[in-house]
Image: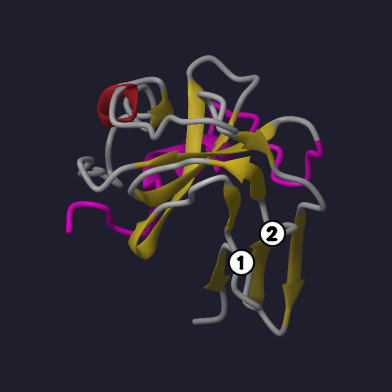
Amino acid sequence: MAVASGVFVNNVIAALGSTNLDLDLESETELKVALFTNSITADFDASTANAAYGAGVFNANEVSGTGYTAGGLVITTTTLTGSSGVMTFDSADPSWSSSTITNARGALVYNNVLSPKSAFVLVNLGADYSTSNGTFLITVSASGWWNVDLVP
């Protein structure tokens, strides 16, 4: 298995540090999710230039097929919340209806308006999934795409 789940550390540092990378995790128009095969190996400490859609390992091995457009789709109902010291990023469950997709293994969430298109999180779907004129649905965990316990 080449696809791993994780948050891209350097993009978080860039967002919170002096470069102020504008990763708006509550945007209803800027964030997208793209699907990749198991042929990618992400470096979660990669430079911000390589941790982006269309760059580094995300410049190849994106799925294709009927009902799927390169670049994925905009994710909606995004929230960034905090409770009991835990920060959580969540959204509505993304889906591609009437799709024929083969061997999707990783879901990359990225900001589509930045240059480069900064990736924030990559999620291993746990297996290779395919559809044949059906709905490809990612059911986001009840705990969101990711959460971080900020209490030491």
Callout 2 touching callout 1 (CB < 8 Å): yes
Q: Secondary structure at mark 1?
A: loop
Where are the magenta residues, as a range?
A: 1-28
> What's the residue at 32%, 22% (across, down)?
59
Q: How many marks?
A: 2
Q: Position of residue 34 (x, y in %)?
A: 50, 37
* Mark 1 neighbour density, 10 Å: few (under 14) some (14–19) many (20 or more): some
Q: Does the magenta run of residues contain 136?
A: no
Q: Position of residue 77 (x, y in %)?
A: 82, 52
Q: Position of residue 38 (x, y in %)?
A: 24, 48
First in residue order: circle 2 vs circle 1:
2
In terms of depth relative to the viewer, which is nearer, 152 or 86? 86
Amino acid under disc 2: Asp
In terms of depth relative to the viewer, which is nearer, 18 or 15? 15
Residue 139, numbered label: 1
Q: Secondary structure at mark 2?
A: loop
Relative side of 1 to 145, left or right:
left
Relative side of 54 to 30, left or right:
left
In terms of depth relative to the viewer, which is nearer, 18 or 66? 66
Q: Does the magenta run of residues contain 3?
A: yes
Q: Quadrant of residue 85?
A: bottom right
Amino acid under disc 1: Thr
Alpha-carbon span between mark 2 and mark 1: 5 Å
Residue 93, numbered label: 2
Q: Position of residue 50 (x, y in %)?
A: 32, 26
In terms of depth relative to the viewer, which is nearer, 115 or 36? 36
* Mark 2 neighbour density, 10 Å: few (under 14) some (14–19) many (20 or more): some
